[in-house]
């Protein structure tokens, strides 16, 4: 898939105010320092579509971007470790949950994980929530340019082991990416394109 247009549509903290268009949505979420904005900008060929910041936790709203006029990329707040007040965190964690559990247009979420670190409990817990809630998702490992291929393979294997230990029958579909080197860009976009084709072919709502 080639992205020709990427347009910011709306930011809000109320799922009921998300776009009414019945277009497939792909949500991007991860810990607050995972490199989500850089990845989104790389995928969409826009340097500043998603706001990058040296201060983790800057995204605190549901951000909708219309891609190629036929699907939405949704940028969600990070989970865990964000330096915001407990009150603020409890509010946006609730609307994250509301989004995942009520948004009918969501066809797939991408859970972003920093490949530089060994398996983190908070990521495993979040993916367990997604699995238990039957929310379809893939894993995107970020920052692959920061470590060796051997370490990448080792850390992916560690995640597989942890997930199997947490009663997963198989590892979710995953991608290894680098926003700096555009690694994994074609794979992620082609995956979205394939899912979109299936969605438009098989679901009369879209």
Image: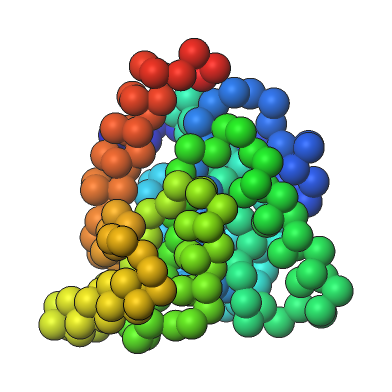
- Residue 163 can be seen, yes or no: yes
Left or right, residue 31 beside residue 164: right
**Residue located 59% across and 23% down the image:** 22
Measured as percent of width and height from the top left, residue 111 is found at 45, 60
Q: Residue furthest left?
A: 150
In which quadrant is the N terminus drawn?
A: top left
Q: Nearer the viewer, residue 105 or 55?
A: 105
Left or right, residue 156 beside residue 91: left
Measured as percent of width and height from the top left, residue 122 is found at 53, 78
Measured as percent of width and height from the top left, residue 18 is found at 72, 37
- Quarter location, residue 81: bottom right
Left or right, residue 134 beside residue 202: right
**Residue located 48% across and 82% down the image:** 121
Identify whether 137 is placed above or below 102: below
**Residue located 46% across and 19% down the image:** 203
How many marks can you see?
A: 0
Picture colour scheme: rainbow
- Quarter location, residue 145: bottom left
Measured as percent of width and height from the top left, residue 12 is found at 76, 47
Left or right, residue 13 beside residue 130: right
**Residue located 66% across and 78% down the image:** 82
- Residue 145 can be seen, yes or no: no
Q: Nearer the viewer, residue 95 or 57?
A: 95
Identify whether 10 is placed above or below 52: above
Q: Residue furthest top?
A: 204
Identify whether 147 is placed above or below 73: below
């Amino acid at each position: 898939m080639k992205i020709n247009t990427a347009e910011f549509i709306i930011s809000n903290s109320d799922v009921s105010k998300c776009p009414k268009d019945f277009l497939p949505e792909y949500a991007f979420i991860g810990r607050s320092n995972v490199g989500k904005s850089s990845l989104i900008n790389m995928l969409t060929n826009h340097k500043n579509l998603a706001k990058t910041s040296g201060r983790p936790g800057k995204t605190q709203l549901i951000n909708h971007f219309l891609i190629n006029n036929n699907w939405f990329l949704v940028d969600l707040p990070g989970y865990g470790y964000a330096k915001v007040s407990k009150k603020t965190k409890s509010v946006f964690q609730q609307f994250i949950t509301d989004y995942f559990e009520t948004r009918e247009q969501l066809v797939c979420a991408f859970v972003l994980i920093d490949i530089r670190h060994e398996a983190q409990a908070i990521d495993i817990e979040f993916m367990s929530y997604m699995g238990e809630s039957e929310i379809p998702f893939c894993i995107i490992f970020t920052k692959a340019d920061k470590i060796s291929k051997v370490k990448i393979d080792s850390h992916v294997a560690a995640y597989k082991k942890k997930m199997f230990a947490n009663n997963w029958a198989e590892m979710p579909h995953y991608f290894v990416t680098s926003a700096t080197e555009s690694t994994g860009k074609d794979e992620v976009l082609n995956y979205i394109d394939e899912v979109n084709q299936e969605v438009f072919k098989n679901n009369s709502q879209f």
